Image: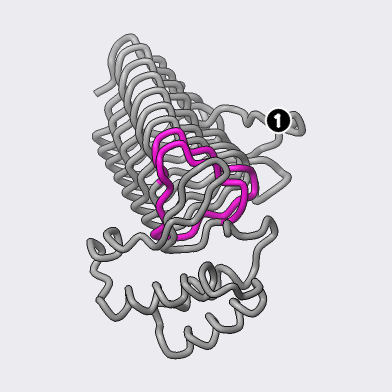
């Protein structure tokens, strides 16, 4: 399952059924789970652990040193879960000692060509990153979030679960769960109703989320007053809890 032109360090740990394409390079501190397919001309290096049944297409750079001038070759890691699709020319970097020391990508993510996941990013499950979406360092992305093509996310920004970024969005502040944004800089456009329907949210849940969105974005409330009102709503509507918890804390401010 390993092409004769591939270079796999003897110390690398590859489980049964791993495929490695032509001219790919696998470093000594790499672990790859069963059923994962690595295409041709892929470089996987650093302290990198990749789970089961992933598909990594040609010309990806996985586990390279971070693009951070403070990095001093410390022993940091990259962890990728199971069943991810990682298309051509993607680059994922290991973490730094300035944060948790590990960059993480969860399970079942659909990551299109030319996506960059920088050092110390934490990506959840079932996300979609369209072509050329870029995460700066220390970005957190919640489950089911969708980043449109050419979306750029500033360092330390949090992207909430079930949110949606239109094409060419520039995110400079935290994006609450469920919210749809677009533009440079990003502006709120409503909630991701269609995505929530597809994921089984009930009509009552979606209406409760819309009411919470209205409190934050349409009622002219201060951020603190909106937080209080949404926290009260979360005591009644469980679908609002995630929204309330997210907006209760932010270091970079919220997209508003």
Q: Nearer the viewer, residue 170 or 220?
A: 220
- Residue pictured at 54% horizontal, 71% vertical: 216
Q: Position of residue 54 (x, y in %)?
A: 31, 39
Residue 11 at least partly seen: no
Residue 57 at least partly seen: yes
Q: With 129 as the anchor, is 247 left or right in this view?
A: right
Taking the magenta stretch, the answer to whether it contains residue 141 is no
Residue, disc 1: 73
Q: Position of residue 93 (x, y in %)?
A: 55, 33
Q: Main secondary structure of the magenta part?
A: loop
Quadrant in which the N terminus appears: top left
Q: Position of residue 214 (x, y in %)?
A: 47, 73
Q: Position of residue 66 (x, y in %)?
A: 63, 31
| Tag count | 1
Quadrant in which the C terminus appears: bottom right
- Residue pictured at 62% horizontal, 73% vertical: 248
Instruction: Give the extent of the magenta segment.
Output: 147-174
With respect to residue 137, does 192 lie above or below?
A: below
Taking the magenta stretch, the answer to whether it contains residue 170 is yes
With respect to residue 90, does 4 lie above or below?
A: above
Q: With 22 as the anchor, is 13 left or right in this view?
A: right
Residue that protrudes farthest toward the top in the picture? 5
- Residue pictured at 66% horizontal, 59% vertical: 253
Q: Nearer the viewer, residue 190 or 171?
A: 190
- Specify how the rendered protein is coloured: one colour
Q: Quadrant of residue 8?
A: top left
Q: Nearer the viewer, residue 170 or 81?
A: 170
- Residue pictured at 51% horizontal, 76% vertical: 215
Q: Residues within 10 Å of mark 1 (few under 14, many from 20)?
A: few
Element marked by disc 1: loop
């Amino acid at each position: 399952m390993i092409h004769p032109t591939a270079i796999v360090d003897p110390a690398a740990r590859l489980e049964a059924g791993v495929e490695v394409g032509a001219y790919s390079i696998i470093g000594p501190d790499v672990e790859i789970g069963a059923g994962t397919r690595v295409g041709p001309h892929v470089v996987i290096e650093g302290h990198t652990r990749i789970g089961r049944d992933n598909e990594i297409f040609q010309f990806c750079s996985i586990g390279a040193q971070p693009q951070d001038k403070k990095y001093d070759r410390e022993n940091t890691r990259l962890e990728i879960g199971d069943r991810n699709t990682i298309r051509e020319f993607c680059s994922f970097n290991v973490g730094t000692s300035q944060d948790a020391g590990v960059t993480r990508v969860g399970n079942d993510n659909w990551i299109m060509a030319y996506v960059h996941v920088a050092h110390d990013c934490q990506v959840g499950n079932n996300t979609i990153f369209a072509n050329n979406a870029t995460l700066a360092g220390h970005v957190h992305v919640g489950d089911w979030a969708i980043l449109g093509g050419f979306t750029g996310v500033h360092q330390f920004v949090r992207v909430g679960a079930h949110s949606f970024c239109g094409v060419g969005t520039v995110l400079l502040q935290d994006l609450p769960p469920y919210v749809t944004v677009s533009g440079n800089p990003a502006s709120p456009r409503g909630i991701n109703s269609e995505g929530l329907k597809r994921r089984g949210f009930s009509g009552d849940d979606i209406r409760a989320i819309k009411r919470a969105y209205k409190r934050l974005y349409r009622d002219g409330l201060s951020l603190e007053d909106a937080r209080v009102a949404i926290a009260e709503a979360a005591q009644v509507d469980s679908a609002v809890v995630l929204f309330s918890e997210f907006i209760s804390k932010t270091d970079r401010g919220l997209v508003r």
